[in-house]
Image (cartoon, helix red, strand yellow):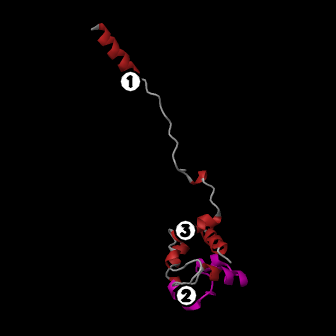
């Protein structure tokens, strides 16, 4: 009987002694842990909250002009994509689609300057 009580006491004591195991997250949990380039942020916005991908593709015209066309024309004319996305610039790529794009200015005007610059960087990163 003593051996049984002693065995239970040892098991109880051993089970109470738990080591705390610190688990590292598989993925970074804050943006500070991931250095994101402007192009990467721009692509994230383009495909995500900006929903630009619904009308624009990299290399072909869908509803709006391709990113390659936009980048080429803005570069050639030394114009600002950011100014246009703020609703403060004239349409220079495809003026016939301006009314369609104008409906999206509510989204782009709500973006920060850094987000708009990141979108611009992403557009230019597709320049061929």
> Can I make out residue 13 in this image?
yes
Q: Secondary structure at mark 1?
A: helix
Q: CA distance from mark 1 to mark 3?
A: 50 Å
Give the crowd class for mark 1: few <14, some 14-19, many >=20 residues within 10 Å.
few
- What segment is highlighted magenta in the picture? 71-100
Of residues 83 and 51, the one drawn nearer to the viewer in this rendering: 51
Task: Check the image and name the residue furthest to the left.
Answer: 1
Q: Secondary structure at mark 2?
A: helix
> Can I make out residue 77 in this image?
no
Residue 68 placement: quadrant: bottom right
Residue at image mark 3: 45
Left or right of 76: which side holds 93?
left
| Residue at the spot 51% in from the left edge and 45% down from the top edge | 25
Task: Check the image and name the residue furthest to the top.
Answer: 2
Residue at image mark 2: 98
Q: CA distance from mark 1 to mark 2?
A: 70 Å
């Amino acid at each position: 009987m003593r051996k049984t009580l002693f065995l239970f006491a040892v098991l109880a004591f051993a089970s109470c002694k738990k080591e705390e195991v610190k688990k590292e997250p598989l993925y970074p949990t804050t943006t500070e842990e991931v250095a994101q380039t402007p192009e990467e942020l721009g692509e994230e916005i383009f495909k995500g909250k900006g929903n630009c991908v619904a009308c624009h593709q990299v290399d072909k015209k869908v509803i709006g002009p391709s990113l390659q066309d936009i980048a080429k024309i803005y570069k050639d004319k030394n114009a600002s994509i950011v100014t246009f996305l703020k609703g403060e610039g004239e349409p220079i790529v495809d003026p016939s689609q301006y009314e369609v794009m104008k409906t999206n200015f509510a989204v782009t005007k709500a973006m920060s300057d850094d987000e708009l610059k990141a979108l611009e960087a992403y557009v230019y990163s597709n320049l061929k």
